[in-house]
Structure formats: structure tokens, C-alpha cells
Image (cartoon, rainbow, N blue to C red):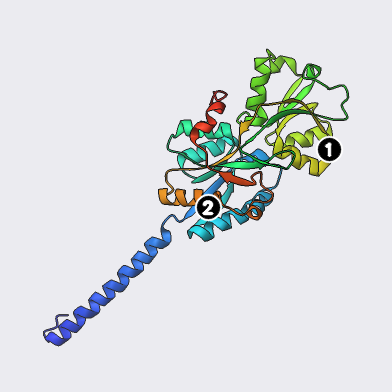
Amino acid sequence: MVYTDPVIRDSCAISMIRNLHIISLIVLGLSLAVKADTFWVGVTPWQKGQSVDDINRLYLPLLDYLSKETGNKFKLKAMDSYEETISEISKGTIQLAVLSPIPYVKAKKIDPRIELLVTELSMSSDQKSKNDSYRSYIMVNKNRKDLNSITSLKGKSIGFVSESSTSGYVVPMAYLQKNKIVPEKYFSKISILGSHPAVTDALAMGSIDAGVTWDFNWQQAKLKYGDIYRTLWTSEPIPNLCIVAHETMPQRLRVKIRSLLVKIPENLIRGLSAVGYVEREDSFYDGVRLFEK
């Protein structure tokens, strides 16, 4: 319809402009709504012996803290394997990841644009200091009086975590090989159990003769079974787990998350392996790269 009256014509024009303005605001609102403001946080299964519900519960206060302080949403994705976590953070299908050292250097090798945000601080065994490193152990059950050295493990069974686990495979395996021990020939059976709790559970039940794990899981296992474990070998310090980000996460948000994590209240991470976070350079993990194949 064509309007010849100038008043009507102008009124219609104003109405159309107003409607277009409203439509543009709706479109803008929709575009903001679908904008990728939800970020996925991947966690390697180093402590997977806990249920997914347990892992979600433990990480929920941290994720809520990040969500509240940044205005974004952070959701946890419990990964099925170390390899899956490396792949997902390298592709950017998860934007944050909690990685142990070897998975971190592997992911960084695949995609150098992955950024180290923070390194975990862990409590020392005497509960007196916070450290940026931990150790790997080859352990046995204390009731095995016949097992008192690595030599005594010849012909016995041993449990590892995963071939991508730093303390649960890579570092102790390097120690064995350095001492000219060929695991496939030395041990009667080698089991890859998938998580640290699975190793200490197996030691407690007696289904393996020896197993490898790290500080935090040892403390968790003591709470579960009591002080039943004894070490036959202890590694040199290993850089702690870290939190990394993929480049698809905006740089300003990465900076914000780093600053939030280094000052996070301890009550928000209670039950996790971290008792705090600290900034470290990528070079902090150079020693671990010597073990990475």
C-alpha cells in the first residue's frame, strides 16, 4: 500500500524504523545468547576411582567461583583417559584442562598455542609447607615382609596407572630402565589399572604385589585403608599438575582466570590435590620433557 498523505507516510516510516530497531536488538540479544560463553574444563582420570559425581562435587566450588567472578559458565568434563584429555585440549573441544606434567608437555607439543595458566601447590607430607612439586613411589603392602627392595620384586606382579601418567608410569619406568631392569622380563605380570586409586585398592586387596602412585593418592588411600603402605623407591621431585587453556578462550579471560586461581580461597578447593595455585613458566616443565617420547 502506498500512502500519499505526508503525515501518515512519516508516521509509518518512524514506526518501521522503531520496529527495525527492536528487531535489531532482538537479533543482538540472540547473538549474545548463543555466543560461546560456556567453557568446558577437562580433568584427567589420575584420581578416577572416585565416581564422576564425586569429581563433579569436588570441582563444583572452583567452577562456581570462576563463573561468578567472570560472568561465564564453566562446566566439568571428566575424561575417560589421559589420551582423550590431551586430544580434546589440543583440538579446543575443551577450553581448560587439569593436566599432570607428561600430558601437559604432550599436549603442548601437539599444539604450542596451549597456554600454561597456573601450577598446583600441594601440601608436604609433614603438612608444614606448600610445594610446587610431588614425588612418585613404588609401593607395597606393609604385610608383605618378603618385599623390602626393588630386587625383591623380581618375579612379582606390579600395577601402573596409565602409560601417559607421569608418576604412575613414565617416571618409575624410566628409573627401572635406567637400572637395566626390563619390566616385561623382570615382573611376572604388569597391570595398567587406569587410575591411582585403582593401584592402591589393588595393593590393599593383595591382587598385585607392588604398585606405583603419587603423594596425594597415598594420603587418600591412607584415609581409606589406614597406614598399610610402604615405599621401596621414591623419585626426585616432579613438577606439579597444572591448569592450561586453549587459545580459543579469549586472552583477557585467560588472564582473569590466572589471577583468580592464584588467590582462590582454600575452602573452595578442599578435597582436590591442590591447596593453592602459583604462576610458573613453561620452562618449569622442561625436566619432564626428558621423559616424554
**In the displayed structure, does residue 36 sit left or right of residue 47?**
left
Query: For the image shown, how many numbered marks are present on the structure?
Result: 2
Question: Is the residue under label 1 in contact with that under label 2 (CB below 8 Å)?
Answer: no
Q: Position of residue 49 (x, y in %)?
A: 71, 42
**In the displayed structure, does residue 113 sit left or right of residue 206?**
left
Q: Position of residue 159 (x, y in %)?
A: 73, 28
Nearest to viewer (mark 2 / mark 1): 2
> In this orientation, which residue lies closer to the viewer: 138 or 235?
235
Q: Residue at x 45, y 52 (%)?
A: 253
When the figure is inspected, residue 281 is found, relative to residue 57, above or below; the finding is above
Disc 2, SS:
helix
**In the displayed structure, does residue 179 sit left or right of residue 282?**
right
Q: What's under tag 2, amino acid-wise?
A: Leu
Q: Position of residue 166 (x, y in %)?
A: 62, 30
Q: Is residue 162 in view?
A: no
For label 2, the residue is 260
Q: CA distance from mark 2 to mark 1?
A: 36 Å
For label 1, the residue is 227
Q: What's under tag 1, amino acid-wise?
A: Asp
> In this orientation, which residue lies closer to the viewer: 249 or 83?
249
Image quadrant where one finds the C terminus: top right
Q: Position of residue 11 (x, y in %)?
A: 20, 84
When the figure is inspected, residue 281 is found, relative to residue 270, above or below; the finding is above
Q: Residue at x 80, y 43 (%)?
A: 224
Instruction: Find residue 162 and report its image quarter.
Output: top right
Mark closer to the chain start, 2 or 1: 1
Q: Is residue 55 in view?
A: yes
Disc 1, SS:
loop
Q: Residue furthest top?
A: 180
